[in-house]
Amino acid sequence: MIESIVNENVLIDQIVLNNIIIKDIYDIDFLTKEGIIKVNKHPPYYYARHGKAFSHLSIKGDGMIVSMRAGVLSQRGLPIPFCFMTLSVPEDPVHKNLHCLSIKDYKKYIKSIQNHLFTKYGIDICLDNAGVKEIEINRTLMLNHAFIEYDRVFRLIMNKLPGILSNQIKFQNLSGDKTEEVSYYANSKQTQHSSRYRNFKIYDKTYCSGRDTDSNISFVRFEFRLKGTQGIKRAFKTNRLSELTDELITDYFDKSIEKNILKRITKWIGERDRFLKNKISSSNRKDNWLVNLLRDCSTWENQYQYPLILDVEELFPIIEKIEKDSRNRSRIKAALRRHASSHETLFSNEDHQKLEEVIKKLKH
């Protein structure tokens, strides 16, 4: 069941390992002919058992390994052997990569990769000290409506991310004459070579579920990507593969969601309500003030590209605090509903309930 892999666990998609040791290569000549290994006339060389040496090793997209590179780097004139391996969760024939793996299951998968290297290439590797250089951590949620209907919710969430994730871009899908948002992407100001680099994505995974993308039910993935040994050590207190646990991964993800999304949205709602209360209180509330209020909310959204209010209903608690007469409160609420449903329809789609839904599911 698809439902068993969403709304539950924090899982891993792509991972990059380092500190892999190549213990032995049983037929360097064969791998050289296959173009996997290159042996230069002069050192530096990567040395395996029995004096077997090569200059560079590269495996790409063989069905199990995204990429594997090994060779020798020069640091301050000293030869430093290296071996990196990039892995991704194998595609499920039905749901493609909607599913991911726990760190426990990922370790089992890496063991199968170890056997694959030995069986297919005659490459014997040691993973005892393998470290994590990059990692993608995510949770996939099943939503109650089509993904595109959450666009305003996701734009609000992205806008309220902390400054460290201020570099943002949206990727769109052109379907017929319609342009739909399919992912929301933010990364840190540091370059990808920085030990503090990380990025965050919200993206549509409905196509992986086998469901029609026009279906009322959709799937969204919230994902953090950490890059760099030091950044991963800061996140988990270790970057050694053998020491990572599902508890560490889940704790980091939940705390990151709490810090970067939940607390910031709660703070924003409080600030927004105070702003709107002052705005309404300072107006003369005559003639077309309700029309102007909704028009101002619409103008805000056009100008700043994220919503001031998601639904007209969000104005009602503010009206309750300002207007003391119960009959006037009822009249104002009814007038706001009528104008929103007939003119400012953006505010009559219950998007505030969609935000509540997403927050509830992120809280797990």
Image (spheres, rainbow, N blue to C red):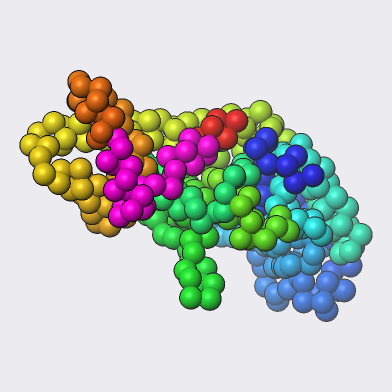
How many discs mark residues in the rendered view? 0
User: Is residue 310 shown above or below 59?
Assistant: above
Q: Quadrant of residue 34?
A: bottom right
In the rendered image, the vertical position of residue 2 relative to residue 211, given as above or below: above
Position of 188 with respect to 207 (left or right) is left
Residue at the farthest bottom position: 33
The quadrant where residue 37 appears:
bottom right
Q: Main secondary structure of the magenta part?
A: helix
Can the viewer see residue 333?
A: yes
Which quadrant: the C terminus? top right
Where is residue 292? Give x, y as percent.
Answer: 18, 48
Q: Residue at x 44, y 33 (%)?
A: 262
Q: Is residue 351 magenta?
A: yes
Q: Position of residue 315 (x, y in %)?
A: 29, 35
Foreground residue among 194 and 100: 100
Residue ID at (79%, 44%): 1
- Residue at image coords 87%, 74%: 30
Residue sitting nearer the eye, 55 or 265: 265
> Along the line of sight, which residue is nearer the eye, 118 or 354?
354
252 is higher (above) or lower (below) than 43: above
Drawn side of residue 162 relative to residue 250, left or right: left
Q: Which residues are magenta?
A: 333-358
Residue 227 seen in the figure: no
Residue 125 position in % (x across, y down)? 81, 51
Say left or right for 288 vs 251. Answer: left
Report x, y in % for residue 267: 33, 30
Q: Quadrant of residue 84?
A: bottom right
Q: Is residue 94 magenta?
A: no
The residue at the point 57 percent across, 35 percent down is: 361
